[in-house]
Amino acid sequence: MLTGLSPSFLYRLENGERHQPSVQTVVKIAKVLELDLMFLVHVIIQKEKETLLLG
């Protein structure tokens, strides 16, 4: 567990059973995947905008 998160938690998150992970969780996952955190934040904001416009 490179993230320090349990496999069952990650499974639920990946399968949509767990919604709105904490900032700390997102940061842990981003670090392990070597993702730029600001890029990830941008993607999340864009997704939220799409949801608001379409939903």
Image (tube, rainbow, N blue to C red):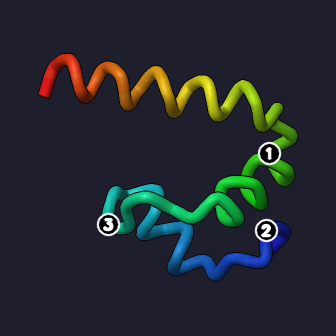
Amino acid type for the residue under numbered disc 3: Glu
Residue at left 71%, top 65%? Answer: 24
Mark 2 closeness class: few <14, some 14–19, many ≥20 residues within 10 Å? some
Residue 51: mark:
none
Labels 3 and 1: the sequence-earlier one: 3
Mark 1 closeness class: few <14, some 14–19, many ≥20 residues within 10 Å? few
Res 47 → quadrant: top left
Labels 1 and 2: the sequence-earlier one: 2
Res 43 → quadrant: top right
Residue at which label 2 appears: 3
Vertical side of 16 occupied by 4: above or below: below
Give x and y (percent) for residue 4: 78, 77
All told, the count of numbered labels is: 3
On the rendered image, what quadrant is the N terminus found in? bottom right
Cβ–Cβ under 8 Å for marks 1 and 2: no
Residue 29 falls left or right of residue 47: right
Residue at which label 1 appears: 33
Residue at which label 3 appears: 17
Cβ–Cβ under 8 Å for marks 3 and 2: no
Labels 3 and 2: the sequence-earlier one: 2
Residue at left 43%, top 58%? Answer: 20
Amino acid type for the residue under numbered disc 1: Leu
Amino acid type for the residue under numbered disc 2: Thr
Distance in Å between CA atoms under marks 3 and 2: 19 Å
